[in-house]
Amino acid sequence: MSELGWLPALGVAARRGFARLTTEPFTIAVILGVVVLVCASVQLGGDVDALRRTLGLWHQNDGLWSLLAFGMQMCLMLVLGSVLAAARPVRAGLAWLARISGGPRRLVGLTALLSCTLALINWPFGLICGAVFARGAGQEAARRGWRVHYPLLCAAGYSGMMVWHGGLSGTAPLKATTLGDLQEVLGPALAGQIGPIPLTETLFGGLNLWVTGGLWLLAPLLFMAMTPRDGSDPAAVPAPAAGQPVLADDLSPGPASWLDRLERARLVTWALALPLAAALALHLQTEGLATLDLNTVNLGLWLLALVLHGRPDRFLRACDVGVRACTGIILLFPLYGGIMGMLNGSGLSAALAGRFAEAGAGVFTLVTFLSAALLNLVVSSGGGQWAVQGPVVMAAAQAQGVAPADALLAIAYGDQWTNMLQPFWAAPLLAITGVRARDITGYCALWLLAGGVWIAACLLVHA
């Protein structure tokens, strides 16, 4: 182990230590729901009638079914981001980048830089592209005779999930730009008090530029430093053999009829792409970039994915692959909605908000960041976490006089921070790269520690 150097050795040790700490998010969500059910029942009186009332809060329209529109937005974002990453021009560009890398350390650093950059544009795009690039980079390293530690490459490909919520697809900032979206999560009264929060105060504000810019620079430097020397890792995992498909196959048999030709006709693609482009341009012209929301992001993703795939049949096959990754969102968002309904209807949200309000304004965002990081371990979706924690934190921020944008960003940073320990969003990367969660968790934990110090320092200085 001493031959590794202290930082690579620490990464290997962390990889082994965290191997036993992974679990299924669905199980955690069920357990969390039962805990909230019990606590809410106690809050309402602790008798049979209180339990009956709590169950009503859980399954009513403000509970289980309150996040259906939100969940569909997130499913579309995940599917369309995956489809965009599956386009042949994108895959060709990733392969070219892997070929021009100058050595093992540079290859690892480039993987982290690419993952973080693309995640800031769109998190599913960055997640899938990071996975595809890590796999291709491992195969390119094998072709050149470089003995790069493949799990480290894959961890670098996942590193963008710790910066995504400060980027253009950040759920909480995008969900706060319009009053209607705020009301869906915070309720009419609190949303009316806070009002829409433009992106100039969140994503393009000074705090986020410092936090996210610093993480973007730190990631490639840290992963390069964690790269073990050639052949020194005690449990190296090789990259999968080249030639195995990882995304939708673009090849299809020739058309057999005029219907087959129609299904492959680029005219069909452009018949949808042109009105999509016109609608996107009109929206940006009239509303501006500061009011960018989830629907506008999905509109842009749909347009890019259509154009880059060219043919409608290729686009649909890529969608079939992307939809398989939506199982978690489809099943978990109703559970998060039920938790939110019980918290709000029982008064637990107000009680928790009072606890948050006890934190002084100088440390409010830091406390929020740490609590959001803890909650993310059980509520794995950024959208679900904003739905559950947003009402509590924003009410407390109002009481403390903390800027709503700062409180919102603290939630976002906590959510993205512990993604490095949360296996939920790593599932697509693991499927594409062929590694196990336990192979990359240790490296991700060290990235979490380094990034967490930077985020905490920025929050304290900004306060």
Image (cartoon, rainbow, N blue to C red):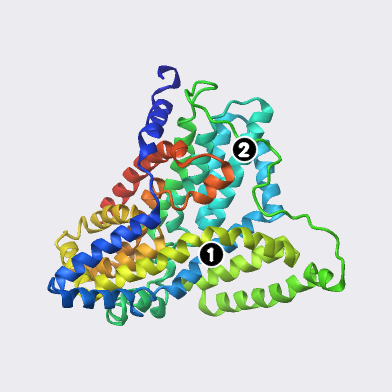
104, 327: nearer the viewer: 327
Is 275 on the left or on the right of 105, as rendered?
Answer: right
**Residue farthest to the front?**
48
Q: Is residue 69 above or below residue 256?
A: below
Name the residue located 46 percent from the left edge and 51 percent from the top edge. Answer: 161
Is 11 on the left or on the right of 350, as rendered?
Answer: right
In percent of width and height, residue 107 lies at 58, 35
Q: Quadrant of the N terminus?
A: top left
142, 170: nearer the viewer: 142
Name the residue located 22 percent from the left edge and 69 percent from the top edge. Answer: 349
In percent of width and height, residue 76 lies at 55, 67
Marks 2 and 1, how far apart at CA = 26 Å
In percent of width and height, residue 369 lies at 29, 55
Q: Quadrant of the C terminus?
A: bottom left
Asked if one can make out residue 330 in the rendered structure from this viewpoint, the answer is yes
List the residue tagged with mark 2: 137
Residue 77 shows which numbered tag? 1
Name the residue located 50 percent from the left edge and 21 percent from the top edge. Answer: 232
Label 2 secondary element: helix
Q: Residues within 10 Å of mark 2 (few under 14, many from 20)?
A: many
Name the residue located 44 percent from the left edge and 17 percent from the top edge. Answer: 3
As shown in the figure, which amino acid type bears the numbered disc 1? Met
Toward which corner of the image does residue 347 lie, by quadrant? bottom left
Q: Residues within 10 Å of mark 1 (few under 14, many from 20)?
A: many
Residue 193 shows which numbered tag? none
Asked if one can make out residue 81 in the rendered structure from this viewpoint, the answer is no
The numbered mark, 2 or 1, whose residue comes first in the sequence reads: 1
In percent of width and height, residue 128 lies at 57, 51
Q: Is residue 51 above or below residue 461?
A: below
As shown in the figure, which amino acid type bears the numbered disc 2? Ala
Q: Is residue 273 above or below residue 454?
A: below
Label 1 secondary element: helix
